[in-house]
Every structure is written in C-alpha cells, then in structure tokens.
Image (tube, grey):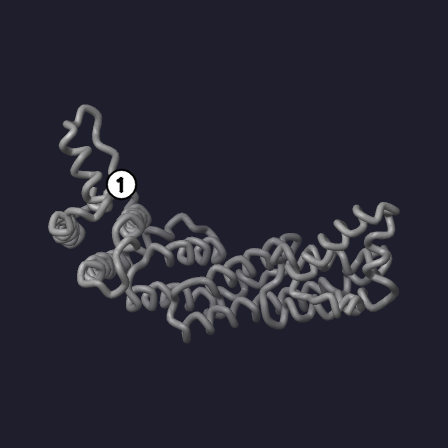
Amino acid sequence: MRSGAMPPPAGAPRSVDRLNDLIAEDLLPDSRIALDNLLVKRIIRARRLADGLLLGELQALARIGTLCVANLPDKSEQRLKLEDALAGRCEKLLTPHAVAAYLADADTAYACLERLTALEPMVYGRANKRELANYILPILTAPEREKQLAVVDKQVIQRMQTLAKLQRLTARSGFDPAQKDKMLCRYDVLCHRMLRESQFLERFAATAGAPWEKALKLLHYLADVTFTEGKAAQAVRKLARDYMREGNFLESCVAHTDNPAEGARELKKLMDLMTAAGLSDQDSGAG
C-alpha cells in the first residue's frame, strides 16, 4: 500500500481500493509518510521478516527496497530513513554464524563465492557491503583455497567461465572500490593461472582447422565470457588476432554465400561478435 501498488485483498471495501489509488497518485503525502514511519519501525523491530534465515531475510529486505526506497527522491528524508533501517537490519544479519550457516552445504570454494556474491545486490549500506566483501576475499586469497580454485582438470573451461562470471558480477556490484579491485584482480590471476597451466592455448593451436575457423571459435569463447578480463582475456585476444591476420578473415567467414544481402547480414553478425569479444574491425584487417 505504501507504494500505491498493493492490490486490495479479496472482499476489501472500495475505500481501501480508493486509498491505494490516492497514495499511488501522491495525493496523500502525509499518509505515505505515516506508512513509511510504520515500515521503518517494522524493519527495525520485527523478529523475522521471512523464512530462509540469511537469504530469506535479505530477499525480503530487497523486495522492500525495490517497492519503497527506489520510488523516493534521492537524499529525501524518508528515503534516508528507510535506507538506514534496511542497512541496520542488514548489519544484524551479516554475522559470522549466519554466514557460516548459509554456506554450510556449499561444498566447494566456487559454490561459496557464488553464494556470497549473489547476496551483494540485497545488502544495504556501504559498511555492510564491505563486511560481505570481507567474507569473500579470504576465499580468494587463502593458499589452501587457491588449490581448490585453480585446479586444472577436465572441468577447466567451466572453472574459467565461473571465474569470469563472478568477475563480471563483481565489476557491476556496489562493493567498496578498493575491495572490488582486489577481487577483480584475483579472479583474473586465478583464471590466467589455469589458462597457462592447462596449456589451453597451446592445445588449441594444435587442433585442426583453418586460421579463420580457429579465430572464429576463439571469438565465440570470448563473447561467451569464458575468460576473465585482464591477462587471461588479453592472451586469448592476442591469439585470435594472430589467426585473423593469417589470410582474409572476413571474406573467409562469409564465403559460403553468394547472396549479397545474406552476406551483408553475416558480416554484420560477425562484426557484432567481434565487438562482444572485445575486438574491433581493425583487428580483422577490415579497417
């Protein structure tokens, strides 16, 4: 109701429906403020907001934030009150005991990183985001954890993809900039280590196929975010450029069609793929 978006319960009198409409049209500002104040009290005092311990509670807070906080003007008094209440409750939730329980059945370091990173959008308050990062960083930096994260086995591509996904989520997050930089760098260090120790690029170079075919496959790997940004992706892009410069890359990719219109469409798709892979038309020799 506070957002004016609450559907009236079944059998509710028309007055409830009308009140909802008036609040939605911002015609009852005092009523909205009263509801905001009530909501702040509930957030602060409620013993439980949802089932599911840490995750359930944070999901409930995120829903409240989406419905209420996001619709208020930046730095308005009511918005600041709600944000403070949400941050205060987050602070009480992010305890070592609660986090340990949340990670209890996460059986790998990757699972722990994925679960913790997934919480970031639901956490309010800069101090709380720093606290969440403090749970993530030891997993990324502890020597015994590195052995779990940088394992070179048959799942090496999937592991690199997971690191790249986590790096991308972290880059988009609201983590403290200094902590974020550490995490981004660490993800790339781990991915680049696996890239080297698995001899992925050397084994790829030894596979059959024309240079343009190999370049195309590497572009798809890059566009699918298989490697972390940094040294890992740079090494793959370098090899892709080398293949693209061996012969007429663009012409070879569209040589299967004699239809000019279809050829133009294929060329556009190829240029889009190159952009997604972090390369430009100049890398192909087209510029």
Circle 1: element type: loop
What amino acid does circle 1 point to?
A: Ala
Confirm whether residue 286 shows in the render. Answer: yes
Q: Is residue 239 visible?
A: no
Q: Position of residue 139 (x, y in %)?
A: 44, 64
- Specify whether 134 is left or right of 17: right
Across and down, in percent, residue 165 comes to 53, 57
Is 213 left or right of 14, judged from the image as shown? right
In front of the other: 181 or 136: 181
The foreground one among 247 and 136 is: 247
Q: Residue 204 in the image: x percent, y percent? A: 77, 60
Image quadrant holding the C terminus, namely: bottom right
Query: Which quadrant of the rendered structure holds the N terminus?
Result: top left
Horizontally, residue 162 falls left or right of residue 199, namely left
Question: What residue sits right under mark 1 in the picture?
Answer: 5
Which residue lies at the image location 24% right of the left edge and 44% below the top edge?
24
